[in-house]
Structures are given as C-alpha cells and as structure tokens.
C-alpha cells in the first residue's frame, strides 16, 4: 500500500497538512523548529533518506512549511549523496528557488511524486474574490503597484511580498521574512505623504518562475495582527498562489481589525 510523507517546515502549515492526511509519515530537517511531531533527517544523507522512504512504501511527498538553508557538515556526507553535492551547491549559488528545484528533482529521480499543497488541501489556497471588507480605489491601485514590485523582484529571488501606500513602496520582503517587513512598515508609518490618505496594502505572491509545489507564501492570524499594527488598510495576494492558514480565525481577526482580505485575480 502506497504512503505519503510530509516534509515538515516551520510554521503552522505542517500541522494543518498532517492532520488532514490519513496517517502520513512526517519528517523534518534535523535542527529545524517544527510544530508537527517529526522524525529528523539530514541533507548530508539525502539519498539514504530517500531509500528509507521507498522501503516504507512512500510514493508521494508533500513539503509543508518554511525550510531554511541548513548548515552542512562535510564529515557527515555519505558517498552517494556526496556525488550530488555539486548539483545542489551550484543551484544554491543561483538562489533559493534554484536550490529547492534541484532538491525536488532529486526526490523525483528517486521515484517519488512531489505533490503541491493545493492538490492535498485545495481549501487552503483561496480562489479569486474578496474574503473580508472592501478595498478602496486607492487601495486597489496600491495593490496593483505592489504586485508589479513583487513580480519585478522575482527574477532576483529576493522575496514574495511588498507594502505600498499612496503609490509609494514602504517595504519589500527579503531574507528576514514577512514579519520583519511588517515590523519595518510599522516603524515607518509616518513616511506616508498624507497622514489622512490611504493607509497601504500588503501584497503577497509566489515568484513568477517559482515551482509552486514548495515554499508558497502564507497568510494567517499573525499576518493580520502585524498588518493591523502597521496601520494598513488590508492584505491582498495572488489568487490561487497563497496559502491561507486558520481561515476562520484569520477572517474574524481581519474583520475585527477593519482590514480587507483580497485574493486578487
């Protein structure tokens, strides 16, 4: 009987995926702080790990949650994994997206099918529409501009989000992540030209060439709380390209904070 394995990352996505599946096997990179009970594995022994998945009858794998670049210990590489190290290191020089694509390729070469989150839990990836509130015309313009910024940053492999207010970019997402971007925007709220004008919009989307089976951007209650602290008008994202965690709570928190939530087509 075939089984599915979850490669758990940081955040609340992994527990949501694990709870929705029927007795999956759950693994995480050793040293990664994950919220789902998981057996550890090391990237330095990737091929023996993939052999173990095959021995357990695993045919499908889903990646759930943020995965930071691990620190590799050369002394721990087994001979077979050592042979593919140049592939992964060369990809890392290009950027995180390239490195992740190379890792996915290694999984597939071992006979494993890598599933996307929306294939496992389609309800986590909202289709186009307004979920809460109503953006103003100025908010829609700010969201349009933020979307162009995120698309422009994509080829540089920098981040998956931007904050725009009154036609000005207040912040873009980089390695520290969305929380750091929102904290920065909160510190610099006075940069808006008109204190009584549009408050601004957080926009999130996958990078244009991103493999959507891994590292999709996420939005949840923490995002809403930080967006409210930054005094933004709302959150917009690419419909079908962003994971919405704890949907009911997120919508309720946004409604209470007066923020709109918009899966933008």
Image (cartoon, rainbow, N blue to C red):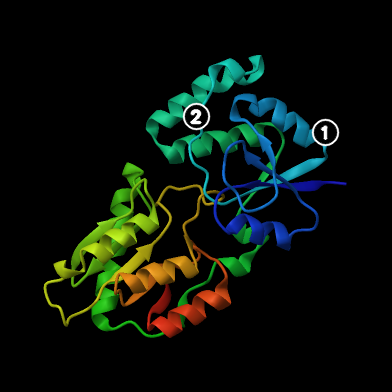
Q: Nearer the viewer, mark 1 or mark 2?
A: 2
* Closer to us: 184 or 170: 184
- Give the Cα distance between marks 1 and 2: 27 Å
The residue labelled by disc 2 is 71
- Marked residue nearer the N-terminal end (1 or 2): 1
Rendered image quadrant of residue 140? bottom left
Query: What crowding class fits label 2: few (fewer than 14 Cα within 10 Å), some (14-19), or many (20 or more)?
Result: few
Left or right? Give the position of 182 relative to 130.
Answer: left
Query: Which residue: 61% across, 70% down?
Result: 123
- For the point 35% across and 74% down, the residue is 228
Asked whether, in this view, residue 45 is left or right of residue 67, the answer is right
Left or right of 44 on screen, residue 23: right
Q: Position of residue 247 (x, y in %)?
A: 56, 73
Where 75 sits versus 237, above or below?
above
**Which residue position holds label 1?**
55
Can residue 167 be seen by looking at this rendering? yes
Farthest-out residue, right: 1
Q: Residue furthest left?
A: 193
Residue 133 position, x and y percent, is 40, 85
> Percent from the top left, x then y, of residue 109?
66, 32
Crowd around label 1: few <14 · some 14–19 · many ≥20 (10 Å): few
Question: In terms of secondary structure, where does tag 1 sit?
Answer: helix
Q: Residue at x 42, y 71 (%)?
A: 224
Question: Is 225 drawn above or below residue 75 in the view shown?
Answer: below
Nearest the eye: 163 or 153: 163
Position of 106 with respect to 153 (left or right) is right
Residue 150 against residue 165 in the figure, above or below:
above
Quadrant position of residue 12: bottom right
Q: Can residue 145 be seen in this view?
A: no
Secondary element at tag 2? loop
Q: Which disc, if any, is residue 260?
A: none
Which residue occupies 66% across, 52% down? 36
């Amino acid at each position: 009987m075939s089984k599915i394995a979850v490669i758990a990352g940081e955040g609340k996505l992994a527990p949501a995926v694990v709870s929705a599946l029927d007795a999956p096997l759950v693994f995480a990179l050793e040293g990664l702080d994950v919220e789902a009970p998981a057996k550890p594995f090391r990237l330095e022994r990737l091929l023996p790990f993939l052999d173990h998945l095959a021995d357990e009858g695993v045919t499908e794998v889903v990646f759930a949650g943020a995965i930071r670049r691990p620190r590799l210990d050369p002394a721990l590489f087994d001979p077979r994994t050592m042979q593919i190290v140049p592939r992964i290191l060369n990809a890392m020089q290009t950027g995180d997206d390239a490195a992740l694509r190379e890792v996915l390729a290694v999984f597939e070469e071992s006979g494993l099918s890598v599933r996307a989150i929306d294939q496992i839990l389609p309800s986590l990836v909202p289709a186009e529409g307004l979920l809460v509130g109503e953006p103003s015309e100025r908010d829609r313009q700010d969201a349009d501009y933020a979307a162009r910024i995120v698309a422009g940053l994509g080829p540089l492999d920098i981040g998956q989000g931007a904050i725009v207010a009154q036609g000005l970019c207040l912040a873009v997402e980089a390695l520290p992540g969305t929380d750091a971007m929102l904290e920065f925007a909160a510190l610099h709220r006075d940069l808006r030209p008109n204190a009584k004008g549009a408050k601004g919009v957080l926009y999130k989307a996958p990078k244009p060439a991103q493999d959507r089976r891994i590292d999709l951007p996420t939005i949840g209650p923490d995002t809403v709380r930080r967006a409210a602290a930054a005094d933004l008008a709302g959150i917009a994202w690419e419909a079908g390209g962003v994971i919405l965690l704890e949907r009911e709570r997120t919508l309720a928190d946004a409604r209470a904070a007066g923020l709109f939530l918009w899966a933008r087509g």
